[in-house]
Every structure is written in C-alpha cells, then in structure tokens.
Amino acid sequence: MTMLRMKLTVKQIMEIYANLSLNFRIMEDHEYYDNAMKEFLKYDGTVSFFDSMFIHLMEELEICELVSFDSDFDKVDGIIRIH
C-alpha cells in the first residue's frame, strides 16, 4: 500500500485494499516468523530461515509437495521435493 501511494489516490488505494480483503486471505505474520524460528532451530540452522517459513506454512496448509531446486527441503520429513 505504501508504494501505491506514489501513483494512486487514497480512495483508489482503499478500493484495492477492500478488493484484497474480500477476495484473499490476509495473514498477520509475526506468528509465522515465530514458528519459522522454531523450524529453523529444529534443523539446527541447516535449513534457511525463509525455507523454515515455507516448511511451517506447508505443514499448516497440509501441503506435502514442493517444486524447488533447493535440496535443503530433502532434509524435511513429510515434504516431497519435485525438481
């Protein structure tokens, strides 16, 4: 929204926000960062922090397959990496 302010009016930004709110799931992220840190520590830092975020989200959303060239996901039980 901050970047939109450079090009759009406040009214236009509010319309975009309303559209996003109605059609998409908006997630508060601090809980995800906390859970990502738990995953990061679980793998003793051998999986990156942002990979840890994806691992947590995949578990929460019950996603078990991931298309990635990142072999770190091979360390994670329950995730099938497609490459």
Image: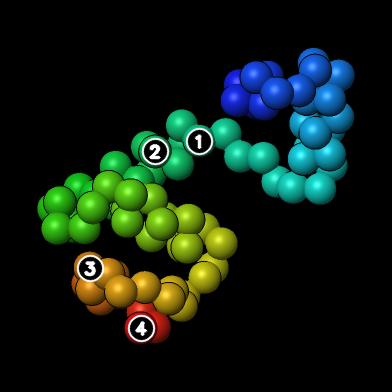
Q: Earlier in the sequence, mark 4 or mark 3?
A: 3
Of the two numbered discs 3 and 2 in the rendering, the one whose residue sits closer to the viewer: 3
* Residue at which label 3 appears: 72
* The N terminus, quarter of image: top right
CA–CA distance between discs 4 and 1? 28 Å
* Marks 1/3: CA–CA distance: 23 Å
The alpha-carbon separation of the residues under discs 2 and 1 comes to: 6 Å
Q: Residues within 10 Å of mark 1 (few under 14, many from 20)?
A: few
The residue type indicated by label 3 comes to Asp
Q: Residue at position x 77%, y 31% from top? A: 17
User: Residue type at mark 2?
Assistant: Tyr
Q: Left of 12 or right of it: where is 53?
A: left
- Label 3 element class: helix
Task: Describe the element under mark 4 as helix, strand or loop.
Answer: loop
In the picture of the structure, the residue carrying the numbered disc 2 is: 33
Measured as percent of width and height from the top left, residue 48 is found at 23, 52
Where does the image place residue 56, in percent across and percent down from the top left? Answer: 41, 55
Residue at horizontal 46 percent and vertical 62 percent from the top: 59
Do labels 2 and 1 touch, CB within 8 Å?
yes
Looking at the image, which residue sits at the far top? Answer: 10
Q: Which one is in front, 27 or 23?
A: 23
Cβ atoms at labels 1 and 3 below 8 Å apart: no
Q: Which residue is mark 1?
A: 29
Q: Which residue is mark 4?
A: 83
Assess disc 3: are there few (<14), some (14-19) or many (≥20) residues with their C-alpha within 10 Å of its C-alpha. some
Q: Nearer the viewer, residue 19 or 46?
A: 19
Q: Would you say 23 lies left or right of 75 here?
A: right
